[in-house]
Image (cartoon, rainbow, N blue to C red):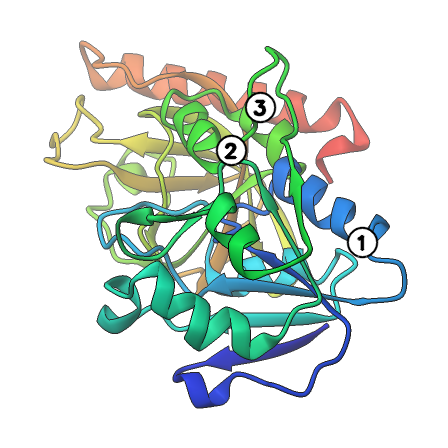
Amino acid sequence: MKSFLIKNFDDIPTNIQDLSLVFGLFDGVHKGHQGLINYSYKNSKNKKIGVLTFDKALKETSCSLMSLEDKKTELSKLPIDYLFILVCDENLKRMSHETFLNLVLKKLKPSTIFCGSDFRFGYKALGDVAYLKEHFSNVNVFDFVEDDDGNKISSRSIKDLISNGEIEKANNYLTRPFQIDGKVVSGLHNGHDLGFPTANISPDINYVLPKNGVYFTKIELENKKIIAVTNIGVHPSISKLDKPIIEAHIIGENEDLYNKNVKLYIYKKERDEINFKNLEELKKQIQSDKENCIKYFSKSDLHK
């Protein structure tokens, strides 16, 4: 897969022949996205597959399912020849669908366009499938991939699952554990004082955060994965915070992670965050969480 980072419209390659173009944000590269891309591959005969996406969400307040680097990694696993990444600046955010079509889509000269039935583009999302069909002769519409309830699998629906703590269900639709990339920073050292030292992870981007609670996770550092019990929340039993933080207690390792970049993979929500009456109750519960985490990861090879 060859990638193009498009900072201005002069960076758009114009010499690619027989291009099938798939367009979208592809946040999460979930089952629905995979279905669309595989559909385009199966229906493109000998054409090259190109994916047109953005380096970040067009709305500043939008939380994300993945970083750009992780998006590139997951897309590289699919039958894609070219990846076109548009740098999302103020000009692009306010660009009309007519201008976008002329400055971006027509310059790529796709022989075929593949998109979802509810596809929208341009300022205020005024561009749609009908508008594309007015300007391109070969527009193929992919319906959607259904979830377990017969509804469309979407980035929004997966974010809602994560926000509700339904991690295992979200992971099923993502086809992999939900991942947060970040740096280990200095914390309040409450875990260390309790006998369960934690790594305080500051996310690299504005990820959607799981519901406050305790999760079974793995931390990856330099291609090595270590199991951990991770609390996401405001730890109400000790020095309650104004907003949630991510604190991972690594099991069976004495790795010094401070100031290092890590990947946190979240597999299962064990319980909600609880306000304990005293520290002894809290320590007893953390020990139980730790034992349950070890049992969880020893059950199957699925969690390697």
Q: Nearer the viewer, mark 2 or mark 1?
A: 1
Say if mark 3 contacts mark 1, CB within 8 Å: no
**Marked residue nearer the N-terminal end (3 or 2):** 2
Question: Is 245 situated left or right of 271 in this image?
Answer: left
Q: Where is the C terminus found, in terms of image quarters?
A: top right
Question: Is 133 situated left or right of 184 in this image?
Answer: right
Depth order, front residue of 200/75: 75
- Cα separation, mark 3 vs mark 2, equals 16 Å
| Above/below status of 58 relative to 227 | below
Mark 1 crowdedness (10 Å alpha carbons): few <14, some 14-19, many ≥20: many
Q: Where is the N terminus found, in terms of image quarters?
A: bottom right
Q: Nearer the viewer, mark 3 or mark 2?
A: 2
Mark 2 crowdedness (10 Å alpha carbons): few <14, some 14-19, many ≥20: many
Q: Residue at x 85, y 49 (%)?
A: 42
Mark 3 crowdedness (10 Å alpha carbons): few <14, some 14-19, many ≥20: some
Q: Residue at x 29, y 12 (%)?
A: 281
The number of numbered badges drawn on the structure is 3
Quadrant of residue 93 in the image?
A: bottom left
**Where's residue 211, x and y in %?**
34, 25
- Cα separation, mark 2 vs mark 1, equals 20 Å
Question: Does the image show residue 254?
Answer: no
User: Which structural element holds mark 2?
Assistant: loop
User: Which structural element holds mark 3?
Assistant: helix
Quadrant of residue 156 in the image?
A: top left
> Any mark on residue 41, and which?
1
- Under mark 1, the amino acid is Tyr
- Under mark 2, the amino acid is Ser
> Any mark on residue 168, and which?
3
Name the residue beneath numbered marker 2.
154
Say if mark 3 contacts mark 2, CB within 8 Å: no
